[in-house]
């Protein structure tokens, strides 16, 4: 190896020498540069030494603080004395300060370890101002705003409040609403925040498009939806505005409609609501798949409860093989089977339909499985929430007792009876809770008491009476015992009355009701003559009524009553001549009515009632029949009967339809010996008009006598027996007619209560349309008077007086009153008249129906229940007195 090395060294000596020379030169050239680098490093180290000492924070000061204490501001940052300062540390300080949202500006300066933080505080909110709002009141907006007076203003809070206000308007269907916040600077670093609102129009549903429907038209499907297209005909509808919740509900309605028509595979593929560019309207598009239509195949019941025969129940199912499939019918059947099981004590019975679909022949088999369940007994009944009403008042309305077998029908009936009391919240329901054992159940009556006292003020306007005022105060749950105490007062130009009543529904805690009424009624009947209101007769009735009732069945009861009335009918002195009632002034029937009489009346009433609520019924029926006999003492003798019935149906979507009818008949038991005189006195007859029949005034229907003048206002002779003269007299303000009442009447009513939107329901608005049909008739036609030349002037003996003209001995003309119509020689005897001539006409005694239509609104207003009716008479008889408008209002406590 050494040899090879030595040889190599020798061979490379010239090259090596050259390389060594180059290396040496390079080393000598780098010595000065290395020396210079060392000097630069030493200088940098000398300068870095003092800088490293200044990065330590010695003090932190705050400048610009007004409301906040400096120590509070320092608590918001992480920098502390002794920390090492850097630019990143300064940036973090600013981030910490801005994160508090308390400052509008902030800066940090480090002077040799002395850090100074300069801040500008956000202003304080002085007040919140809402401008431009009309559809939403301020008290609806302010609770949604988080920013409030005396708070620190921050931009994020303002942005959030703007979003909340816009959301409020979207809930109202105003998607075009905009809100612009503005800040008004005040002294002492305060600001007013102004939200300027542009509400914009209400976003309506312009169009509803349906894609994929072949079996049903777009119009048919739109009719099933709750949302409606905005059209002129839907001006008053609240369902034309866009509502996302309603959109989802409409999809369910579409599915329900198709399922009831047999389309078991129907589905809504998509439902898209697009807002138009102007944000005024929505266009809704549904994409649907109808699928095939199915029919029922085999339909049966599989009962695992031994008390039920599966075959017998299967034969009674409403659907049959071959019928079109109807999902609603299936649901109703499940409900009916569950209720049937509950009737037999199986409260927890489980009924489920099993479906078997055959796509080949498009049929659907349904088997209703009634699973085994234990018979259930009522463990106990809990009554909660009643603070005033005693427990026994509720418990006595239960149709099932503790320890009884559970019965769903009895529970439902108990619910209806408690609802009918009117003491508690609407739509009260009895809750069913599992008991301590599987075969035990607890019934809970969780009630919310409501006002049962009622202070009612009623007002009406009549073309004859002007304003009618009435007031009553009633407590239907006196002392929480279920007793009813009432006082009523009525006043008008027509009548005055006062009544005190008391009712005990359970005498000595037994199912026997009792009550008493004490009353006084003063009636002034009147007519008009020469634009002057004239009282025709006055009737003062003082009476006492006692009643007692007992239940015959669950839905039927009997009420016996005894009434004693003392009546005093009188006429003013202007209707008397020579101390006797003058028929030419008062009409014969009024003269027959005057006098004092007493009536001793016994009565019996049978009631049948299945209404779900007596206050606001929605389903069920009520029937009553009353017979009264007057003659056990007293001076009056008659037999009177009345019948009333009403039925209510809930016809879906909140509509309630009702039919009601009533009728009455009275027979006098004393024969009248005077021709043209009815054997039923005026005060005992029926009268018809307001409030029983809308569209007619008080006593505005039925028989009456109308007097037609033989002379007009210019004292010119007329022919009053023509129909035009009768019509003119009835339409005249000088109309002189008297209602005679009737011995029989009938009255029918059809009414449809119309549901409104949720907002109207919350306000308690319940509008309705109605048709009233009725008539009053059946009295003996009275003897009518006819005085073509005038009413004769008579003496005390009833002899007509004549004015005799002649001359005395001196030839002077003299006059004298005589009773001889034949004038002596040289004299003239002229008949004397005390009143202009008239002719009486008997009208209105017709069995033909009177018909009126109209609409009304019930409103649970803040000051009490309010009812208004506007009516139009379609058919009437000559002599009827019509009326268009009436209202009444009350309050509760």
Image (cartoon, grey):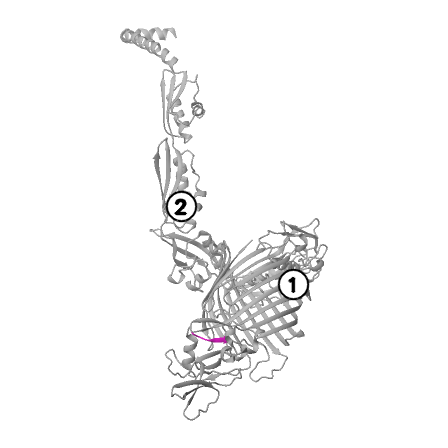
Residue identifier under label 2 = 166
Residue identifier under label 1 = 516
Where does residue 2 sit, x and y in percent of width and height?
38, 6
Dot 2 or dot 1: first in sequence order is: 2
> For residue 428, which numbered disc appears in the image?
none
Residue at coordinates 44% horizontally, 45% vertically from top-left? 139
Which of 320 and 879 lies nearest the eye of the viewer?
879
Which of 626 and 407 lies nearest the eye of the viewer?
626
Q: Is residue 198 above or below residue 27?
A: below
Name the secondary structure under disc 1.
strand
Residue at coordinates 38% horizontally, 88% vertically from top-left? 811
Tell me where the magenta segment starts and ends, as one range: 734-738
Where does residue 720 sit, x and y in percent of width and height?
42, 82
* Residue at the limit of the structure toward the right, as seen here: 403
Residue 736, magenta (yes or no):
yes
Judged by its main secondary structure, the magenta piece is loop
* Residue at the limit of the structure toward the front, as seen here: 810
Where does residue 676 sit, x and y in percent of width and height?
55, 83
């Amino acid at each position: 190896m050494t040899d090879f090395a030595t040889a190599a060294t020798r061979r490379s000596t010239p090259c090596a020498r050259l390389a060594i020379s180059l290396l040496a030169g390079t080393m000598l050239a780098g010595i000065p540069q290395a020396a210079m680098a060392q000097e630069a490093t030493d200088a940098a180290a000398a300068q870095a030494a003092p800088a490293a000492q200044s990065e330590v924070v010695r003090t932190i000061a705050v400048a610009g603080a007004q409301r906040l204490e400096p120590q509070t501001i320092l608590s918001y940052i992480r920098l502390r004395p002794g920390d090492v300062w850097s630019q990143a540390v300064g940036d973090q300080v600013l981030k910490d300060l801005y994160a508090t949202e308390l400052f509008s500006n902030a800066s940090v300066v480090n002077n040799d370890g002395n850090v100074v933080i300069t801040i500008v505080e956000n202003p304080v909110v002085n007040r919140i101002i809402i401008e431009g709002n009309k559809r939403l009141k301020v008290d609806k907006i302010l609770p949604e705003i988080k920013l409030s007076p005396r708070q620190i203003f921050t931009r994020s809070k303002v942005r959030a409040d703007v979003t909340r206000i816009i959301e409020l308007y979207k809930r109202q269907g105003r998607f075009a609403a905009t809100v612009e916040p503005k800040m008004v600077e005040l002294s002492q670093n305060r600001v007013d925040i102004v939200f300027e609102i542009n509400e914009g129009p209400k976003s309506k549903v312009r169009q509803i498009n349906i894609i994929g429907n072949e079996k049903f038209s777009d119009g048919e499907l739109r009719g099933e939806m709750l949302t409606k297209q905005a059209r002129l005909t839907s001006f008053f509808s609240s369902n034309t505005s866009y509502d996302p919740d309603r959109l989802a509900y409409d999809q369910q309605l579409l599915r329900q409609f198709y399922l009831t028509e047999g389309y078991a595979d129907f589905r809504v593929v998509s439902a898209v609501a697009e807002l138009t560019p102007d944000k005024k309207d929505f266009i809704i598009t549904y994409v649907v798949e109808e699928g095939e239509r199915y029919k029922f195949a085999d339909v049966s019941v599989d009962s695992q409860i031994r008390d039920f025969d599966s075959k017998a129940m299967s034969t009674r199912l409403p659907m049959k093989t071959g019928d079109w499939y109807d999902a609603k019918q299936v649901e109703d059947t499940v409900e009916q089977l569950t209720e049937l099981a509950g009737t037999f004590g199986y409260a927890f019975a489980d009924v489920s339909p099993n479906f078997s679909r055959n796509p080949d022949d498009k049929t659907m088999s349904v088997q209703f499985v009634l699973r085994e369940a234990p018979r259930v007994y009522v463990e106990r009944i809990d009554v909660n929430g009643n603070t005033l009403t005693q427990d026994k008042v509720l418990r006595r309305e239960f149709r099932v007792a503790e320890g009884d077998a559970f019965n769903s029908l009895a529970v439902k009936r108990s619910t209806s009876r408690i609802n009918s009391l009117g003491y508690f919240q609407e739509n009260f329901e009895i809750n069913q809770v599992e008991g301590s054992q599987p075969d035990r159940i607890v019934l809970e009556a969780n009630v919310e008491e409501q006002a049962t006292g009622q202070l009612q003020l009623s007002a009406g306007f009549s073309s004859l009476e002007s304003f009618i005022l009435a007031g009553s105060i009633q407590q239907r749950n006196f002392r929480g015992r279920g007793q009813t105490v009432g006082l009523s007062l009525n006043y008008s130009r027509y009548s005055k009355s006062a009544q005190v009543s008391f009712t005990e529904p359970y005498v000595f805690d037994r199912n026997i009701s009792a009550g008493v009424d004490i009353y006084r009624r003063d009636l002034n009947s009147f007519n008009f003559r020469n634009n002057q209101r004239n009282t025709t007769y006055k009737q003062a009735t003082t009476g006492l009524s006692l009643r007692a009732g007992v239940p015959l069945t669950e839905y039927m009861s009997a009420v016996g009553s005894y009434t004693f009335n003392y009546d005093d009918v009188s006429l003013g002195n202007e209707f008397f001549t020579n101390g006797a009632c003058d028929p030419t002034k008062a009409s014969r029937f009024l003269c027959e009515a005057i006098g004092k009489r007493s009536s001793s009346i016994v009565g019996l009433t049978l009631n049948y009632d299945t209404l779900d609520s007596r206050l606001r019924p929605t389903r069920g029926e009520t029937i009553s029949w009353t017979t009264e006999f007057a003659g056990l003492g007293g001076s009056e003798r008659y037999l009177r009967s009345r019948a009333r019935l009403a039925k209510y149906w809930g016809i879906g979507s909140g509509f309630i339809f009702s039919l009601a009818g009533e009728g009455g008949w009275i027979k006098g038991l004393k024969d009248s010996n005077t021709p043209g005189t009815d054997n039923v006195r005026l005060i005992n007859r029926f009268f018809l008009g307001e409030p029983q029949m809308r569209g007619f005034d008080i006593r505005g229907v039925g028989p009456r006598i109308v007097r037609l003048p033989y002379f007009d206002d210019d004292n010119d002779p007329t022919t009053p027996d023509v129909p035009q003269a009768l019509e003119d007299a009835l339409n005249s303000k000088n109309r002189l007619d008297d209602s005679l009442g009737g011995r029989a009447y009938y009255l029918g009513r059809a009414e449809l209560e119309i549901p409104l939107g949720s907002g109207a329901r919350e306000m308690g608005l319940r509008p309705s349309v109605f048709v009233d049909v009725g008539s009053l008739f059946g009295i003996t036609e009275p003897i009518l008077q006819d005085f073509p030349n005038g009413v004769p002037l008579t003496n005390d003996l009833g002899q007509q007086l004549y004015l005799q003209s002649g001359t005395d001995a001196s030839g002077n003309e003299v006059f004298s009153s005589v009773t001889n119509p034949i004038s002596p020689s040289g004299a003239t005897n002229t008949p004397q008249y005390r009143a202009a001539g008239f002719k009486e006409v008997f009208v209105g005694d017709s069995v033909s129906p009177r018909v009126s239509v109209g609409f009304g609104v019930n409103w649970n207003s803040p000051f009490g229940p309010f009812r208004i009716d506007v009516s139009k008479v379609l058919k009437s008889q000559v002599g009827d007195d019509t009326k268009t408008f009436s209202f009444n209002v009350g309050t509760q406590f």
